Image (tube, helix red, strand yellow):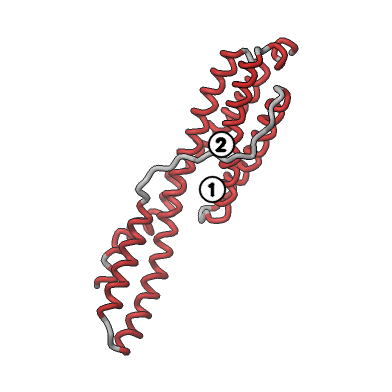
């Protein structure tokens, strides 16, 4: 293993591999935080179980990265990377539409009886919308989960090439292990998508009608 230690790298090469290992650690720091918030909000039991497992894996990934960074004389970062996201977000479009339609309607109804009836109608609309929006939100967040895991795969694949390039052979097993776990998680999310849609699609599909409810 002596051939793979930090002492065998030039100072510049060692500084660079530490920098890129810390970039991966910053990604995992952000990922850990996101998985924790997803655990709080997910409405799919299988997803919760899988996220719980991946939270443990993510913490072990961080520990492995920290060990390698430290053994190369680096300081493990607490920074959190910005995780990938694709916009526009459908859920915001639906919510905006529902909100603006209800506001417009209540502004038009100045009468007191109308106002009371209107507000109870609005609360019913809001309640059913929340059920529908929760399903759609879950779908959108699952899509982002998969994007993040695939971004992690890209990160580790390129980090692997950088480690090989500078000859940081001790980093390779760590990168390889983390990469395998990210690939398993990414595969699981896509493989589970039919099950998730079977559970949520009816609610997601009727949310297309949420736009017209306040106008009825
Ligand atoms: Fe991950």
Q: Residue at x 67, y 35 (%)?
A: 60
Left or right of 170 on screen, residue 136: left
Name the element at disc 2.
Answer: helix
Can you tell me whether the CB of the residue at mark 2 lies under 8 Å from the nearest atom of ligand 1? no
Classify 10 Å Cα crowding around label 1: few (below 14), some (14-19), many (20 and above): some
Give left or right: position of 182 versus 147: right
Residue drawn at x 35%, y 52% as measured from the top left = 90
How many numbered marks have been drawn onto this rendered protein structure?
2
Q: Which residue is mark 2?
A: 27
Between 181 and 188, the one lying in front of the other is 181
Q: What is the secondary structure assignment of the residue under circle 1?
A: helix
Which residue has dot 1 on it?
Answer: 47
For the residue carrying disc 2, how many other residues have a C-alpha within 10 Å: few (<14), some (14-19), or many (20+)? many
* 77 on left or right of 100: right
Nearest to viewer (mark 1 / mark 2): 2
In the rendered image, the quadrant that contains the N terminus is: top right
Q: Earlier in the sequence, mark 1 or mark 2?
A: 2
Q: Is residue 133 above or below residue 7?
A: below
Note whether 80 is above or below 124 in the view shown: above
Residue shown at 55%/52% (left/top)? 45
Residue 163 falls in which quadrant of the image?
Answer: top right
Q: Where residue 105 appears, x then y in whole percent?
A: 27, 75
| Image quarter of the C terminus | bottom left
Q: Is mark 1 within 8 Å of ligand 1?
A: no
Check the image and name the residue furthest to the right: 2
Residue located at (31% from left, 72% from top): 103
Task: Tell me if residue 74 comes above or below residue 120 in the rendering.
Answer: above
Image mark for residue 160: none
Q: Position of residue 129 (x, y in %)?
A: 38, 65
- Between the C-alphas of marks 1 and 2, the distance is 21 Å
């Amino acid at each position: 293993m002596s051939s793979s230690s930090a002492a065998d790298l030039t100072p510049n090469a060692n500084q660079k591999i530490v920098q890129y290992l810390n970039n991966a650690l910053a990604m995992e720091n952000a990922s850990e935080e996101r998985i924790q918030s997803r655990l709080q909000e997910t409405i799919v039991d299988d997803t919760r179980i899988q996220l719980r497992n991946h939270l443990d894996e993510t913490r072990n990934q961080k520990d492995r990265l920290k060990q390698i960074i430290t053994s190369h004389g680096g300081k493990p970062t607490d920074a959190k990377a910005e995780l990938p996201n694709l916009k526009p977000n459908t859920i915001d479009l639906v919510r905006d539409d529902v909100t603006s339609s209800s506001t417009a309607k209540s502004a038009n109804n100045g009468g007191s009886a109308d106002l009371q009836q209107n507000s109870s109608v609005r609360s019913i609309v809001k309640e059913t919308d929340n059920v529908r929006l929760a399903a759609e939100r879950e779908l959108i967040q699952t899509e982002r989960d998969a994007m993040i895991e695939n971004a992690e795969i890209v990160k580790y694949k390129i980090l692997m090439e950088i480690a090989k390039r500078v000859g940081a052979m001790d980093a390779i097993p760590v990168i390889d292990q983390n990469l395998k776990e990210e690939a398993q998680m990414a595969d699981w999310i896509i493989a589970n998508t039919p099950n998730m849609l079977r559970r949520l699609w009816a609610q997601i599909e009727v949310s297309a009608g949420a736009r017209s409810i306040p106008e009825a």
